[in-house]
């Protein structure tokens, strides 16, 4: 498993972090270098007015790990990131010379997946279609990623640009998806361009189908 340790974007003691869905992150709690941490608690909500330890939260079961015995191990690890993990995370710690202290920083985590956007929605045969591999926020650990494109499940090409452009033509169906270098297995849902013989005359035989586990719909391409 690959860990992605992120420092985030700092602003007024808030560290902004964007991570890819199903990936993993490590959040490091900043404490004075001379401090010997003996215990740590990470939380994103309170229960009975007290910080609710993430390790006790059922929705994080098996996905959260952290240690608080040394400054080096003062890290929150979250694996298999989900949309439900979007929250602001806080920590408090105990040292060998004092009682509990609240950390002076908070970490706001955003979780994004990859989506392939198709433009334009309508196009004539022989015209260009642009596919864009997009996220809802800029990934903290990889703000300038290399995009990997797949055609019918096979590697097509990789590039620093999030866009792929090609000309629409008849004959057969091709599916496209994208991923990011370093997260090769976390690809987007497929977008398929193919023929559809049962469209009314005012439309061409080309459609764009979006396929995922939740929905299936078509965007008709005008003739």
Image: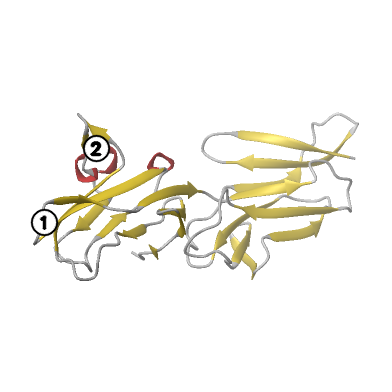
Residue 192 disc label: none
Badge 2 crowding class, 10 Å Cα cut-off, few under 14, some 14 to 19, many 20 or more, is few
Check disc 2 and report the residue beneath it: 58
Cα gap from disc 1 to disc 2, whole angstroms: 31 Å
Among numbered discs 1 and 2, the one appearing first in the sequence? 2
Which part of the image, by quadrant, shows the N terminus? bottom left
Above/below status of 88 relative to 214: below
Q: What residue do we see at 54% from left, 62% from top?
A: 180
Residue 126 picture location, percent across and down: 89, 53
Residue reaching furthest left?
Answer: 96
Q: In x, y percent, where is residue 184?
A: 50, 63
The structure's colour scheme is secondary structure
Residue 84 position by quadrant: top left
Q: Is residue 162 left or right of residue 207?
A: left
x 65%, y 47%: residue: 191
* Residue that appears at 34% across and 53% down: 105
| Image position of 79 (left or right of 205) | left
Q: Position of residue 4 (x, y in %)?
A: 39, 64
Dot 2: what SS? helix
Residue 5 placed where, x, y %?
A: 37, 65
- State whether residue 107 is above or below residue 35: above
Q: Which residue is mark 1?
A: 98
Image side of residue 221 versus residue 80, left or right: right
Q: Count residues near mark 1 (Cα–Cα under 10 Å), then give few for <14, some for 14-19, many for 20+.
A: few
Q: Can you see residue 80?
A: no
Q: Residue at x 80, y 51 (%)?
A: 171
Depth check, front residue: 43 or 22? 43
- The reply to whether the C-beta atoms of the residues labelled 1 and 2 are less than 8 Å apart is no
Helix, strand or loop at mark 1: loop
């Amino acid at each position: 498993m690959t860990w992605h340790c992120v420092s985030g974007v700092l602003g007024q003691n808030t560290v902004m972090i964007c991570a890819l869905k199903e990936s993993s992150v490590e959040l490091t709690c900043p404490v004075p270098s001379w401090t010997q941490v003996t215990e740590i608690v990470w939380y994103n909500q309170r229960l009975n007015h007290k910080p609710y330890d993430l390790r006790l939260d059922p929705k994080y079961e098996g996905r959260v790990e952290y240690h608080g015995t040394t400054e080096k191990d003062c890290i929150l690890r979250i694996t298999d990131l989900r949309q439900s993990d979007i929250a602001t995370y806080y920590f408090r710690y105990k040292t060998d010379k004092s009682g509990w202290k609240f950390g002076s920083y908070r970490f706001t985590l955003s979780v994004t997946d990859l989506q392939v956007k198709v433009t334009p929605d309508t196009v004539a045969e022989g015209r260009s279609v642009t596919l864009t591999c997009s996220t809802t926020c800029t990934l903290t650990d990889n703000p300038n990623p290399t995009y990997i494109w797949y055609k019918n499940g096979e590697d097509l090409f990789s590039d620093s640009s999030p866009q792929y452009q090609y000309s629409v033509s008849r004959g057969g169906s091709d599916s496209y998806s994208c991923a990011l270098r370093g997260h090769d297995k976390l690809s987007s849902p497929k977008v398929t361009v193919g023929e559809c013989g049962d469209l009314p005359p005012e439309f061409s035989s080309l459609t764009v189908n979006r396929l995922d586990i939740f929905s299936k719909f078509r965007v008709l391409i005008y003739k």
